Image (cartoon, grey):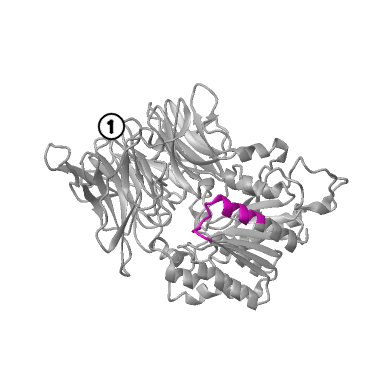
Amino acid sequence: MVLTTGDYGRWPSRLTAGEVARGKVSLAELSSDGAALFWLESRPEENGRVVFVRAGADGPKDHSPADVSIRSRVHEYGGGAVCLVPGGAAGAFAYVDQSDQRVWLCNGQAAASGNGVARPLSPEAPEGSAHRHGGLSATADGRWVLAVRETHTNDARPPQRSIVALSTFSGRPSESTLLAGHDFFGAPRVDATAARLAVVVWEHPNMQWDNSSLVVVQLGRAGSSDPDDDVLIPAGSPWVVAGGHDESIGQPAWQSDGTLRFVSDRRGWWQPYVHPGTPGPPGATAGPVPLTDAAEEFHGPDWVLGQSTFAELPDGTVVARQTSAGRDAVVRLRAAGAPDVVAQPCVSIAGLCAHGDGVALIGGTPDTATNVWVVDTTEPPWPVRPAPRSANALRPADIAHGEPFTVTGRTGRAVNGTLYRPRSDQRETADTPTHAPPLITWCHSGPTSACQLGLDLTLQFFTTRGFAVACVDYAGSTGYGRAYRSALWGQWGVADSEDCLDAARHLADRGDVDPERMAVRGGSAGGMTALNALAAGEGFTACTALYAVTDLLSLAATTHDFEAHYNDRLIGPLPEARDLFVERSPVSRADAMAGAVLLLQGTDDAVVPPAQAERMRDALVAAGTPCDLRFFEGEGHGFRRADTLTACLEAELAFYLEVLHL
C-alpha cells in the first residue's frame, strides 16, 4: 500500500481499539512484605473489577477472593482500599469491598482460588446510614487496621468523617474512634509502637492541595490484657505539626528513627521535611527541617487517599519520586546539595515502596506501558508483570515519543506541553509531505492534574493513524510548583482553555500541525476546558468531551461533599459569583461553538450526572451545532469496561475523520 499525505488519520495501525481497551489495566497501591510485592489491578476485561495481586518467586498471581472487587468510595474517588496486615498469616491483608464499603480481613492463603478466609473488621452501619472506608493502614504488630470512615445518612446532612481503629484480634467487629471533628482526613499513619497517630486534615472550603494541616495524636490502650478486649484510644489532645494558611501538607510517615516525615509546599514546591514528631517544650521554636533544597515537586494532589512517593531503605536513606518539568525521576535525598538520581527507565511514576535493599515502583517508560518495576543495587531494573498483549501490537518504529515544548501564552505566563508526532512503520509515503498532520489537543482531566510522559496506548492509537497529539499542562496543573498550580484560581474556564488554544496555535505557527484541522478533547474538568476552547473560535473545529463538566451551577448544586466548595477558589464563592458560573459554563456558550461535538457519558456518573450531558446536547442542537451524545450503561465518572473503552475510541476516530475531512 502506498499512502500519500492526504491519508493522515487513515494510516493502517496494528493497534486496534479493542487492544487499547484490554491494555488499559491500571495499577495502584504498591506494597511489599519484604519477600513479595503486592498491588491493586483494575481490569477492563472483567468490567473494571479491581484485584489484589501478589508477585513472589512464582510470579504475579491473584491474591484476593475471586468474587470480590476492591475499591474505596471515600471522597468519591477512594484510595487506600487495601493494606498488608503483619503479625499473622503470610500475605494477610485488609481490604474495602466495593459492594458494601466495609473493611474485611483476609488470611491471604490462596484467596483467589477460594481457600482464603475473609471476615469483616468493620461493623454494619446503623440503620438509616451507610459507611465508606478508605486510607487503610495497619499497626506494626497487626493488631489494628486504621481507616478513614465516611458516614452518610438518609437526610440532607453532609457526610461525617473520622479516623477509626478496627481490631483484628477480636472474633467480632470491634472498633474505636481516634480522631473526629474535621471536614476531611488523609490516610492515617501510626508509628512503630502504635503510640502516635499522624494524619493530614483540612476544612471546607479548602482542598488538600490548597490549605491543609498535619496533626499528631498520642495514643493509648484501654481494656484488659486479653487482645480481644484491648482497644486503641486517643490519649491526649491533637497538636498541629505544620500547615494552615496557604500551605499544603501531604504524605506523613514515621521513619525508623521515630521522626515524622511529611511533604509541605511552604517554599513554593511540595518538598519533604522531618520533625521529631513530639511537641517541643514551652517557648521552643524548632520547626520542621527540609530534606532537600531542590525546587522540584515530590508530591501530587491527594485526589485519592494513600499516595506514596517516598520510601525509606534499611539503612535509613530516603528515596523519592521527583517531578521536574513534567518528567518523573527516582532520587536519593541528601541532607545538603542536589538529590542523587537513581538509574531506572520510567518517566512517569505513580508510586513506590521499599523492597529488599532497594525500591519497587509503578511506572511507565516512553516505550512500554505502566508496569511494576524493581530497582535495587545489584542488577538492572526489571519489570514484574508480563507485558500486556496490546503492547505486542506496537513496534519500536510505531511509537511516538514526546517532545516537550513551552510557549509564552497571551497572559505572559509559560504554558508547558508535549508534542507527539504521527508515527507508524506501516505507512509508506509516495512523496515529501505537502502539508502538516491534523492535531488533537489533549486536555488532562484536571483542573489539578498533569499529563504523563509514559506510554499511553490511547494516544498511540491516534498517532499510529497519522494524527499529531499535543498534551497541555494548562494553568492549574501540578508538577511545576504552587504558583503554576494557583494560576487557575479565579480563572477556571478561561485560563485553562486559553492555554490549550495558545499551545495549539504555537504548534500550527511552527508548521508542526495543520491549522485547518485541529481538534480538542478532554474528560471531566478537561472536558469543560475542551468545550470552552472550541467556543473561543480560534482554531478548533472538533471537540470530544468525556463525562464533561458542562453546567457549573448544576455541578455546584449536585456535586459531592469533597468538591462542594472546590469552585470557590477556582471561580468564586456563590452566590456572589453566580454570573461567572453561568458565563464560564459550556452549556451557556453553545451558540459560540463553531464546529462539532462528541459527548461520551456514563449513566451512573455521580460526579457529573447524565442530565448535564443531555442539556449540553440540547443547547448545541438548538444552536445548530452538530452533536452526538452517547451513553454507556453502568459506567460512572471515568470509564472502566473494555467494551465501553473500545466503543469510545472507535466513535472518536470516526468523528475526527468526518469532521476534519480526512
Q: Residue furthest front?
A: 114
Displayed quadrant of residue 77: bottom left
Instruction: List x then y, in percent, for residue 418.
Output: 64, 49
Displayed quadrant of residue 622: bottom right
**Quarter containing the C terminus:** bottom right
Whether residue 412 is visible to the viewer of this picture, yes or no, is no
Residue at 55% in and 68% down: 613
Could you tell whether 354 is left or right of 46 in the image? Answer: left
Give the magenta range: 633-650
Instruction: List x then y, in percent, for residue 13.
Output: 72, 45
Instruction: Looking at the picture, tell me which residue is in the foreground, 430 or 323.
Output: 430
Could you tell whether 532 is left or right of 100 in the image? Answer: right
Could you tell whether 314 is left or right of 653 in the image? Answer: left
Whether residue 38 is visible to the viewer of this picture, yes or no, is yes
Could you tell whether 112 is left or right of 520 in the image? Answer: left
Q: Taking 590 as reference, is 444 above or below it?
A: above
Instruction: Looking at the picture, tell me which residue is in the foreground, 465 or 273.
Output: 465
Please check the rendered image and state whether residue 635 is part of the magenta-colored stretch, yes or no.
Answer: yes
Instruction: List x then y, in percent, for residue 498.
Output: 62, 63
Amino acid type at circle 1 is: Gly
Please check the rendered image and state whether residue 201 is part of the magenta-colored stretch, yes or no.
Answer: no
Label 1: how many Cα within 10 Å (few below 14, some 14–19, many 20+): some
**Quarter containing the N terminus:** top right
Q: Which residue is mark 1?
A: 88
Classify mark 1: helix, strand or loop.
loop
Instruction: List x then y, in percent, for residue 562.
Output: 39, 60
Q: Residue furthest right?
A: 431
